[in-house]
Image (tube, rainbow, N blue to C red):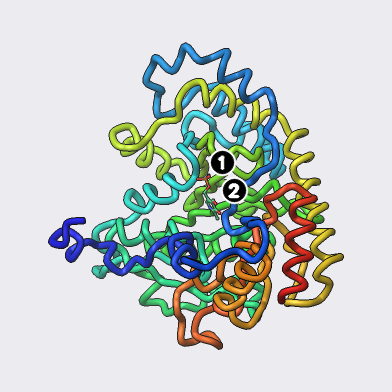
């Protein structure tokens, strides 16, 4: 590490990753039982066999640089899925000019802030709003873009739906972007169409880009969560000020494929495409061919969703109404209220061999919130393991907690 560079880094205020902090928290502590890791949101379900077949069939294309806009087949398949999944009218979203493949949504979430954020807005330093707790990439992106990250509490009291509209006018006027996630990681809350419409109205009023992180859209409990494109369409028939991000990492259990897309606001996609054409990672052509098949197929995603629903049923049976258990409306995390997330994480590791993530590591301190950090009382449990492993883990957790 070069201290001279680090001392001036714009990332100086960025804490270590939640997983590095977790490693430090349990460093030197032996697991009480054979370890089960539920800390990382990495799906362990099987992915469809057609993925490997498509990669093999197109392997010769590893010898070519992929175009930044991907292939027409990919863009059509992704658009087709958006239309089916969210009930958008055929032909509304233009796959040529309103959609781009991305190398996993994380890089796109990061890179888009740089493109969406001017050097100054309303004559001041720009701000980027995000929920608290939140996917940590958002804060890194805000800092990289030279913006002030502003963390807006998502607590039980507001059903984990932050009230962005209640922020001071001065702040909204200099806001360049809002990151929002539905279904939410970590709480599993889902924003309804009314909430989405309000946030889009707010974004348009203040010329803000809304980055809607919808990577858990196909993993839900009872009802399919609505999406921001549908909300935008319902307002005025345009996708202005809205970019949705979707991924095969969760939907198709393919986190290692690094394949997703972003879609929406035409003007932003044009700007993003120009920047990406110079600086961003392209998605390799054989992976795009496999991704095309994955977006065209809903059956494997439905099977995948059912596996998670079974595990939520199991968690409900085992945990009942203890630890603030509730069925997450979407996504695959339990967000359990254990009073002190760090202490519970340590105990679960040393007594049960179960590795979970303290909620505080996904959040920033906020004096306006009881306890000072909206994640402090919680642990996040990723329901990613096979059913028999999850059953063992949940039983051990219930015993120890
Ligand atoms: C909320 C959220 N957004 C984005 C991502 C990034 O997903 P990927 O880059 O695999 O598409 C994740 C991954 O865990 C996530 O939880």
* Residue name at image x 81 percent, y 56 percent: 222
Mark 1: give few (<14), some (14-19) or many (20+) Cα within 10 Å.
some
Give the answer, above or below, for where 385 lies relative to 82.
Answer: below
- Residue bearing the label numbered 1: 255
Q: Position of residue 367 (x, y in %)?
A: 46, 86
**CB of mark 2 near ligand 1 (< 8 Å):** yes
Would you place residue 375 above or below residue 309 in this image? below
Query: Residue at left 46%, top 37%?
Result: 103
Crowdedness near tag 2: few (<14), some (14–19) or many (≥20) residues, C-alpha within 10 Å: some
Name the residue tied to disc 2: 42
Residue placed furthest toward the right:
317
User: Quick check: can you spot residue 233?
Assistant: no
Q: Nearer the viewer, residue 200 or 14?
A: 14
* Secondary structure of the residue carrying numbered label 2: loop
Q: Position of residue 108 (x, y in %)?
A: 43, 45
Residue 253 visible in the displayed image: yes
Label 1 within 8 A of ligand 1 by Cβ:
yes
Q: Which mark is residue 39?
A: none
Left/right placement of residue 147 relative to residue 342 reads left
Question: Which percent across, then down, holds residue 356?
Answer: 60, 64
225 left or right, relative to 56: right
* Image quadrant assignment for residue 169: bottom left
Q: CA distance from mark 1 to mark 2?
A: 7 Å
Which of the pair 147/110 is nearer the observer?
110
Of the 4 image quadrants, the one containing the N terminus is: bottom left
Which type of secondary structure does the marked residue at label 1 adopt? loop
Q: Could you say which is closer to the camera, residue 344 or residue 176?
A: 344
Quadrant of the frame with the C terminus: bottom right
> Of 338 and 81, which appears nearest the observer?
338
Where is 239 relative to 80, above or below? below
Query: Quarter of the image holding residue 50?
Result: top right
Dot 1 or dot 2: first in sequence order is 2
């Amino acid at each position: 590490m070069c201290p001279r560079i680090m001392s001036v880094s714009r990332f100086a205020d960025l804490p270590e990753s939640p997983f590095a902090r977790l490693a430090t928290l349990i460093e030197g502590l032996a697991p009480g039982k054979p370890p089960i890791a539920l800390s990382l949101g990495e799906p362990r379900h099987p992915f469809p066999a057609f993925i490997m077949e498509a990669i093999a069939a197109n392997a010769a294309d590893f010898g070519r640089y992929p175009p930044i806009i991907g292939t027409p087949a990919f863009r059509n398949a992704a658009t087709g899925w958006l239309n089916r999944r969210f009930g958008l009218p055929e032909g509304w979203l233009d796959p040529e000019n309103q959609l781009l493949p991305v190398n996993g949504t994380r890089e796109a979430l990061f890179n888009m802030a740089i493109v969406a954020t001017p050097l100054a807005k309303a004559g001041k330093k720009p701000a980027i709003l995000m929920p608290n707790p939140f996917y940590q990439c958002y804060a890194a992106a805000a800092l990289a873009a030279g913006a002030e990250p502003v963390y807006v509490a998502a607590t039980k009291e507001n059903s984990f739906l932050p009230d962005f509209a209640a922020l001071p006018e001065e702040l909204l006027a200099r806001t360049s972007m809002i990151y929002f996630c539905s279904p939410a990681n970590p709480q599993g809350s889902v924003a309804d169409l009314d909430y989405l419409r309000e946030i889009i109205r707010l974004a348009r009023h203040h010329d803000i880009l809304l980055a809607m992180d919808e990577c858990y859209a196909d993993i839900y409990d009872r009802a399919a969560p609505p999406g921001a494109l549908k909300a935008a369409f319902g307002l005025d028939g345009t996708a202005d000020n809205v970019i949705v991000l979707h991924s095969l990492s969760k939907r198709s259990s393919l986190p290692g494929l690094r394949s997703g897309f972003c879609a929406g606001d035409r003007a932003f996609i044009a700007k993003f495409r120009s920047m990406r054409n110079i600086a961003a990672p392209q998605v390799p052509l054989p992976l795009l061919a496999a991704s095309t098949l994955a977006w065209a197929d809903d059956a494997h995603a439905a099977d995948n969703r059912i596996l998670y629903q079974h595990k939520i049923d199991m968690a409900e049976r085992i945990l009942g109404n203890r630890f603030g258990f509730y069925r997450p409306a979407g996504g695959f995390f339990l967000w359990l209220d254990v009073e002190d997330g760090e202490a519970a994480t340590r105990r679960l590791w040393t007594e049960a061999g179960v590795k979970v993530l303290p909620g505080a590591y996904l959040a920033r301190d906020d004096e306006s919130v009881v306890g000072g950090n909206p994640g402090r009382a919680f642990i996040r449990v990723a329901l990613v393991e096979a059913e028999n492993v999850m059953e063992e883990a949940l039983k051990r957790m219930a015993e120890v907690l």
